[in-house]
Image (cartoon, rainbow, N blue to C red):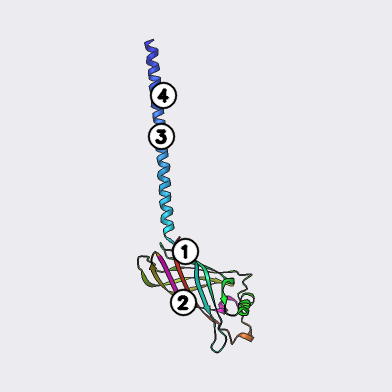
Amino acid sequence: MKRACSKFYHLVKMTNSEQHVTIENNKYRHMKKITVLALLLISLSALAQSKYLTKAGSLDFEASVPSFEEVAAKNNSVTAILNTDNGDFAALALVKAFRFKNALMEEHFNENYAESDTYPKATFKGNISGFDISIEDTTKSIDGSLTFHGVTKEITDISITIKVVDDKILLSGNFKVLVSDFDIAIPKIVANKLSDEVSVDFNFELAKK
């Protein structure tokens, strides 16, 4: 009888011990999952904080010739994103969102020159050299590639003004491109009214993504 009781006691003790180990293991696994999840959330948060975005950037271009009608347009719905960790920058504009003062000129631009039904987007991808978000007001340069009318051209050393105001990053600048660089043919009948050199101005107010 004593031997049976002893065996029963040891069996209960072993069972309790195994249950305790199982509970501890479950606690460990649970804590491990919580830790991994917390680290993941911190990483995602840090990643999100390094991206600044706008969907209301402005892009203006002008290809006017003196003494003739102004050839200029404005797009106020440009999407742009900046990675403050490494200075990578990208922008996208819908070609049909460019607005001209002259409706007929806008129609000709989309149908005969930009061919926006075939090439609906213009994009720019580049890098701001030496970007530092801790500097509130500075001028840097950006190199990148501009794609328009199905053609991609490298553009280098674009001067860009950078300001940090109220947790927003303001980017502005100007560069020039040639119409002929993007396989756009200008009819002879209007060749003297339209400049081959196009001046492009950009302004972006980016907020944390």
**Most frequent secondary structure within the magenta stretch:** strand
Q: CA distance from mark 1 to mark 3?
A: 44 Å
Task: Identify the residue under disc 2.
Answer: 174
Task: Identify the residue under disc 4.
Answer: 15
**Which mark sits nearer the N-terminus, 2 or 3?**
3
**Which mark sits nearer the N-terminus, 1 or 4?**
4
* The C terminus sits in image quarter: bottom left
Residue 193, percent from left and from top: 58, 86
The amino acid at mark 4 is: Thr
* Comparing labels 1 and 3, the label whose residue is closer to the camera: 1
**Which mark sits nearer the N-terminus, 1 or 3?**
3
Q: Does residue 55 appear to the left or right of 31 in the view shown?
A: right
Q: Does residue 1 appear to the left or right of 108 in the view shown?
A: left
Nearer the observer, 179 or 82: 82
Query: Which residue: 41% across, 63% down?
Result: 84
Instruction: Determine which quarter of the picture holds residue 63.
Output: bottom right
Q: Secondary structure at mark 4?
A: helix
Compared to 166, does 28 lie above or below? above
Residue 62, percent from left and from top: 53, 80
Task: Identify the residue under disc 1.
Answer: 53
